[in-house]
Image (tube, rainbow, N blue to C red):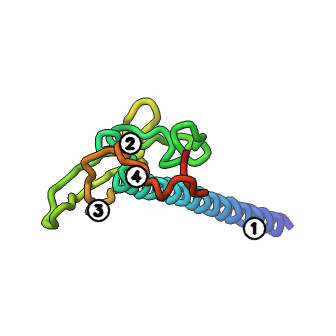
Amino acid sequence: MKTARGAILLEVMLALGLFVGSAAFCLGVTRSLFAALDRADRRQLAVDLACSRLAELEAGMVTLQELRGEWAGGVGSLGDDTDLEAAAPVSAWEIEVTTLPSEYRGLSLIELTVTEVQPGTGVVSDDGVRYTLRQLIALRVQDVEDYQVDEMMEGLAGERQ
């Protein structure tokens, strides 16, 4: 009778150990999955930011000097007053721009690197995201404010005031 009780206790302990081990494994897999999803989201933010800022440069909305440094605001028409904290609540982005001559006349190779840094400190975190975008762009000599408004475009519904 004692051996039967001992065998049942051993079986229960073994089953409990297997259950705890499999639960710990599932929690570890879930944790690593969420970390990978978070990193993919931050990488997508870096890609979007690089593409948007390069498009702004190409359109003449910003200059090369305005692109350099830490990014803390909006992109394009969103401006700096838009609350984008929901998109990246614990991240700041540093933008590095390098211009290189190209073999194509009138075009410059722009290398824009977006790096995730800790807000306020500017220190690159261990798991920080970095994305580099290279594109040929015709740099403008004038800023967008120097362009004249075309008289034919006045009064159109989509015109900006």
Mark found first going from the N terminus, 3 or 2: 3
Question: Closest to the observer: 138 or 118?
Answer: 138
Residue on which the image places disc 2: 145
In the image, taking residue 135 as reference, residue 154 lies left or right, namely: right
In front: label 2 or label 1: 2
Disc 1 element: helix
Q: Residue furthest top?
A: 120
10 Å crowding of disc 2: few (<14), some (14-19), many (20+): few
Mark 4 is on which residue type?
Glu
Q: Is residue 94 above or below residue 121?
A: below
Q: Quadrant of residue 84?
A: top right
Instruction: Write the residue at 57% across / 53% down.
Output: 155
**Which amino acid does the dot numbered 3 rest on?**
Gln
Q: Secondary structure at mark 3?
A: strand
Q: Amino acid at mark 1?
A: Glu
Q: Secondary structure at mark 2?
A: helix
Residue underneath mark 3: 135
Tell me how far mark 3 sits from mark 1, CA to CA.
65 Å
- Residue at numbered disc 4: 56
Asked if residue 115 can be seen in this view, the reply is: no
Q: Nearer the viewer, residue 13 or 145?
A: 145
Label 3 CA crowd tier, 10 Å (few <14, some 14–19, many 20+):
some
Q: Earlier in the sequence, mark 2 or mark 1?
A: 1
Between the residue at mark 1 and the residue at mark 4, the CA separation in whole angstroms equals 67 Å
Name the spot of residue 7 as percent of width and height, x first: 77, 68
Q: Residues within 10 Å of mark 1 (few under 14, many from 20)?
A: few
| CA distance separating discs 3 and 2 | 24 Å
